[in-house]
């Protein structure tokens, strides 16, 4: 009995960390870096910077709106791009009904899932099927351990980043457009503090359900099978989020370099 409980808790932990924990970590890191990058961008170009990344803002809010549609949540107001202080857009919806915490999780994380799909498709147009390394290509044979999995995600993120640079072509309008769209989506895929709060509210009931399912004899086998089926998709999501983090860091360092050059010239 104790061995069964131990195995069930371990399986549930793997599913929770693999499905949500890694996304939480990347979401927090992206928010931290993007706040600095956005602040520096707005410092250089003022409100013009917000208009420059407007397609990404609208796509972000579309992710929230799509989450409302999927959870049958009534949308009160949809403003895909409207500058109000530090707020660039918003979706207001009715918070009522059953499973509200789970609904908020889906709505809050909508930009992440939709953004990953958009980046994947833009990457396919940019560099073909080699843009995103596949799960089976990175991990051959048995399922990887946690450290091996994280190393695989980081390696895939780096490969995507270098792939973006390797097809560099300033003379191609199509390439420049795709590069601009990738920048817009990656710059605004990050979750805001209210989004992170909504994600946390929904995390605990979802985690409880995952643990409960793994404790039920017979049903736990379906949970294990489902996690195996979803593993390649979640690996793609984690790799794309790692790629987004690298893009954010690269542009933040680029803005810092510009700031130093301008500062030296003014002296």
Image: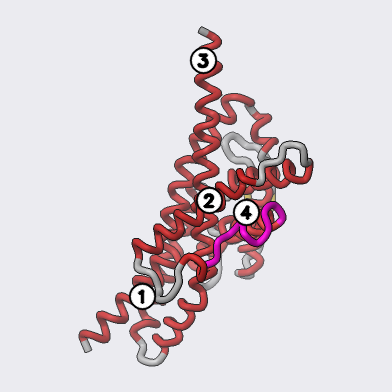
Q: Nearer the viewer, mark 4 or mark 3?
A: 3
For the question of whether residue 100 can be seen, the reply is no
Quadrant including the N terminus: bottom left
Secondary element under disc 4, as helix, strand or loop, is strand
Crowdedness near tag 3: few (<14), some (14–19) or many (≥20) residues, C-alpha within 10 Å: few
Q: Nearer the viewer, mark 3 or mark 2?
A: 2
Q: Nearer the viewer, residue 22 or 73?
A: 22
Residue picked out by circle 4: 92
Q: What number is the disc on residue 12? A: 1
Q: Which residues are magenta?
A: 125-134
Secondary element under disc 3, as helix, strand or loop, is helix
Quadrant in which residue 11 is drawn: bottom left
Q: What number is the disc on residue 243? A: 2
Quadrant in which residue 20 is drawn: bottom left
Residue picked out by circle 3: 263
For the question of whether residue 16 can be seen, the reply is yes
């Amino acid at each position: 009995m104790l061995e069964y409980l131990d195995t069930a808790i371990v399986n549930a932990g793997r599913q929770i960390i693999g499905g949500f924990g890694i996304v939480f970590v990347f979401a927090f890191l992206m928010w931290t870096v993007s706040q600095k990058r956005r602040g520096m961008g707005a410092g250089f170009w003022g409100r013009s910077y917000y208009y420059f990344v407007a397609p990404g803002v609208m796509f972000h809010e579309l992710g929230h709106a799509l989450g409302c549609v999927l959870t049958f949540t009534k949308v009160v107001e949809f403003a895909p791009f409207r500058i109000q202080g530090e707020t660039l857009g918003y979706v207001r919806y009715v918070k009522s009904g059953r499973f509200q915490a789970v609904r908020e999780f889906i709505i809050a994380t909508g930009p992440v899932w939709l953004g990953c799909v958009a980046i994947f498709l833009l990457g396919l147009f940019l560099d073909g099927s080699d843009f995103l390394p596949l799960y089976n290509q990175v991990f051959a044979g048995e399922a990887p351990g946690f450290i091996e999995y994280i190393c695989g995600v980081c390696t895939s993120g780096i490969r995507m980043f270098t792939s973006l640079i390797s097809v560099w072509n300033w003379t191609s309008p199509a390439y420049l457009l795709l590069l601009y769209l990738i920048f817009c989506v990656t710059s605004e895929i990050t979750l805001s503090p209210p989004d992170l709060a909504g994600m946390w509210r929904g995390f605990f009931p979802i985690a409880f359900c995952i643990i409960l399912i793994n404790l039920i004899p017979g049903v736990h086998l379906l949970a294990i099978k489902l996690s195996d089926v979803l593993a390649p998709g979640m690996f793609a999501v984690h790799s794309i989020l790692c790629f987004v983090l690298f893009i954010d860091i690269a542009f933040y360092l680029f803005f810092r370099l510009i700031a130093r050059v301008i500062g030296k010239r003014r002296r």
